[in-house]
Image: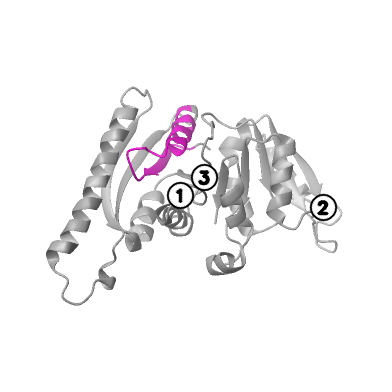
Amino acid sequence: MAYKSILTIVTGPDLGAEALDTALGVTNAQGAHLDVMCLGVDRVQVGFYHAGANAVLMQETLAQAQADAEEALTAVKARLTAETVPWSADSVALQTAAMPHVIGRRARFCDLVVLPKPYGPARSIDHEAMAEAALFDSNTPVVFTPAGSDFTAMPKRVVVGWNQSAEALRAIRAALPMLQQADQVSVAIIDPPRHGPDRSDPGGLLAQMLGRHGVRAEISVLAKTLPRVSDVLLRHAGDFDADMIVMGAYGHSRFREAILGGVTRDMLGEAEVPVLMAH
């Protein structure tokens, strides 16, 4: 099993350098093909134009989105010309509401999507929309890279967040090409249920599955000694000196996490290393 088609998305001439560099690193390590979507976004939705707005105004906003996409495409071509990996790039102009359809359709035919972390300084609503489109509408795993990340090759020390959910198992299966090449993998289980079927051997079946795939994994059972699960997971990743985290995404609904918070949003906002997620 390997990644053979990697997709990343850029929204301006600054390229979102961390995501592009990460995508290049994985592409090179896996002998894959890199696809780059250069996105121009028309943020003024047609349904919100007042009655009588003329076609010229609508055309202007679309033309600006097309210009932004072409500017990003020019920068990508300049950046990738000297690279030895096979790559392709194209420009796409769309409205925010179309992201789920366009990005979802494109990403579902790739093995891995690499995007900038959607929350934090210098991030916009576009980054959040891109992230949710990739996670919910493509059924493809996504690596989110934080600003300042120097993750340019396959990770060597990986923390896996395991809570027995379908989302977590899907993320682990998707991460197998990386886990197999890692030197050390720590499966973090936070406050496992005392009366669950695995109470005598938390994570035992998962460790067995990973071992059969050649993954050197250790089980770390952690107490929830901090207010949030994400705090415990991030502290463990720091103690383990991890250079990537693998976990499921949005075990609860997007609306619930947007209002009440949740592990997914906390990790996407606060993780300082790349996070591979799957929903």
> Residue 204 — which label?
none
Secondary structure, mark 3, is strand
Real-space CA distance between mark 1 and mark 3, rounded to the nearest whole angstrom: 13 Å
Q: Position of residue 227 (x, y in %)?
A: 75, 58
Mark 1 crowd level (few <14, some 14–19, many ≥20, 10 Å Cα): few
Q: Is residue 73 above or below residue 258?
A: above
The amino acid type, in three-letter code, at marker 1 is Arg
How many numbered tags mark residues here?
Answer: 3
Mark 1 or mark 2, earlier in chain: 1
Instruction: Kindly identify the amino acid type of the residue bearing the numbered disc 2.
Output: Ala
Question: Residue 117: image x %, image y %?
Answer: 50, 47
- Left or right: where 57 falls relative to 102: left
Q: Position of residue 143 (x, y in %)?
A: 52, 44
The answer to if 89 sits in the magenta stretch is: no
Residue 115 x, y percent position in the rendering: 46, 45
**Residue highlighted by disc 2:** 223
Residues shaded magenta: 3-28
Q: Give the residue type at disc 3.
A: Phe
Which is closer to the viewer, label 1 or label 2? 1
Along the polypeptide, which appears first: circle 2 or circle 3? 3
What residue is disc 1 on? Answer: 123
Q: Quadrant of the C terminus?
A: bottom right
Magenta-drawn stretch contains 19: yes
